[in-house]
């Protein structure tokens, strides 16, 4: 049954696109083929029933402490659920299910290509790319690391059905923050996966308006200041409440490629 499913097709195309031994990144044509395939995948094809997920309730508080347990200001936090589908050294496939108002804080994807397909719902996406060459500014706190300048790439609400979004190691909005406007689900392909040992750990950030810090005197901002922000490493993002769920879609049957037979150019 799994053979022939759209998830199986996604796995097989990922396998041919992200080769472990590849000396260069996949071509834009190969990435576009993957993106086009993801465009066609429906929630039902990955085992999601929208109504069921919308009714799901969370299991904790955030934005408050337990002394405020009975306070009207305490907010009931519904967890973000991650459904793991597949992972190997070259890529990972999974689904994030976000309840309304949940947030995946601003974070990076070092050296990675990421394809994100909103399966259902509305999602606010804010994304940046680093300004190159790197531009740093000192904060007033002596022990804080400097803030780094980034340029806004996207600041928009995306509503399913919409095209798969692609971010690249240095372009396309490599740093992004997700906020669920309604219950929504995002099918994600990460290539290669996060791997601390390989220098690909996930770092969280908070963003500050450009006017918050003084950049180098010779810095030329070509466009409006509103299109730039200073990003500060945020080691302990608040309100991030994530748990694992069970993927209920078709299982993937692993296939094996032989040198020279599987790559797409
Ligand atoms: Fe991400």
Image: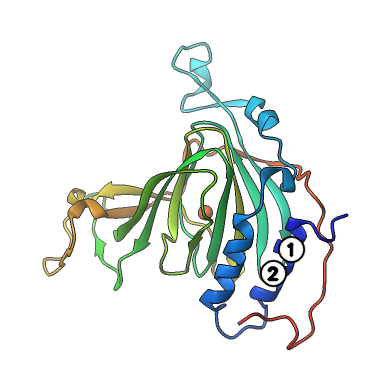
In the picture shown, does residue 241 fall above or below 127?
above
In the picture shown, does residue 135 fall above or below 185?
below
Could you tell me which quadrant the C terminus lies in? bottom right
Residue 202 is situated, as x and y percent measured from the top left of the image, at 52, 57
Residue 152 is situated, as x and y percent measured from the top left of the image, at 32, 56
Q: Mark 1 falls on what kind of element?
A: helix
Picture residue at 34% right of the left edge, 53% below the top: 232
Circles 2 and 1: CB atoms closer than 8 Å: yes
Q: Is residue 179 left or right of residue 243?
A: left
Picture residue at 67% right of the left edge, 44% below the top: 43
Question: Which residue does the numbered mark 2 point to in the structure image?
Answer: 13
Q: Classify residue 97 by image quadrant.
A: top right
Q: Find the distance from the CA under tag 2 to the CA under tag 1.
A: 6 Å
Could you tell me which quadrant the N terminus lies in? bottom right
Q: Classify residue 153 by image quadrant.
A: bottom left
Q: Is residue 101 left or right of residue 84?
A: left
Picture residue at 85% right of the left edge, 61% below the top: 3
Residue 21 visible to an observer of this rendering:
yes
Instruction: Give whichever of 183, 200 is nearer the camera.
Output: 183
Question: Which residue does the numbered mark 1 point to in the structure image?
Answer: 9
Q: Label 1: few (<14), some or many (≥20) within 10 Å? A: some
Q: Which mark is residue 193?
A: none
How is the protein colored in the picture? Answer: rainbow
């Amino acid at each position: 049954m799994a053979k022939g499913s759209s998830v199986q097709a996604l796995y097989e195309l990922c396998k041919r696109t992200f080769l472990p031994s590849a000396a260069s990144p996949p071509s834009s044509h190969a990435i576009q083929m993957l993106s086009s395939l993801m465009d066609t995948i429906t929630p039902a094809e990955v085992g999601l029933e929208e109504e069921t997920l919308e009714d799901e309730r969370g299991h904790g508080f955030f934005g408050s402490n337990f002394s405020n347990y009975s306070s009207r200001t305490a907010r009931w936090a519904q967890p973000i659920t991650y459904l793991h589908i597949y992972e190997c050294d070259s890529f990972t496939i999974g689904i994030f299910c976000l309840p309304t108002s949940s947030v995946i804080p601003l974070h990076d994807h070092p050296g990675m290509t990421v394809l994100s397909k909103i399966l259902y719902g509305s999602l606010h996406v804010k994304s940046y790319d680093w300004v190159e060459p790197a531009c740093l500014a000192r904060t007033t706190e002596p022990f804080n690391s400097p803030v780094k300048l980034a340029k806004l790439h996207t600041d928009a609400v995306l509503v399913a059905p919409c095209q798969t979004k692609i971010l690249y190691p240095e372009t396309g909005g490599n740093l992004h923050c997700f906020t669920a406007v309604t219950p929504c689900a995002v099918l994600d392909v990460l290539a290669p996966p996060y791997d601390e040992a390989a220098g690909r750990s996930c770092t969280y950030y908070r963003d500050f308006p450009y006017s918050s810090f003084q950049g180098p005197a010779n810095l030329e901002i070509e466009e409006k200041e509103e299109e730039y922000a200073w990003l500060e490493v945020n080691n302990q993002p608040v309100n991030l409440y994530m748990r694992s769920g069970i993927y209920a879609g078709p299982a993937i049957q692993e296939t094996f490629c032989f040198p020279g037979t599987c790559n797409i150019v």
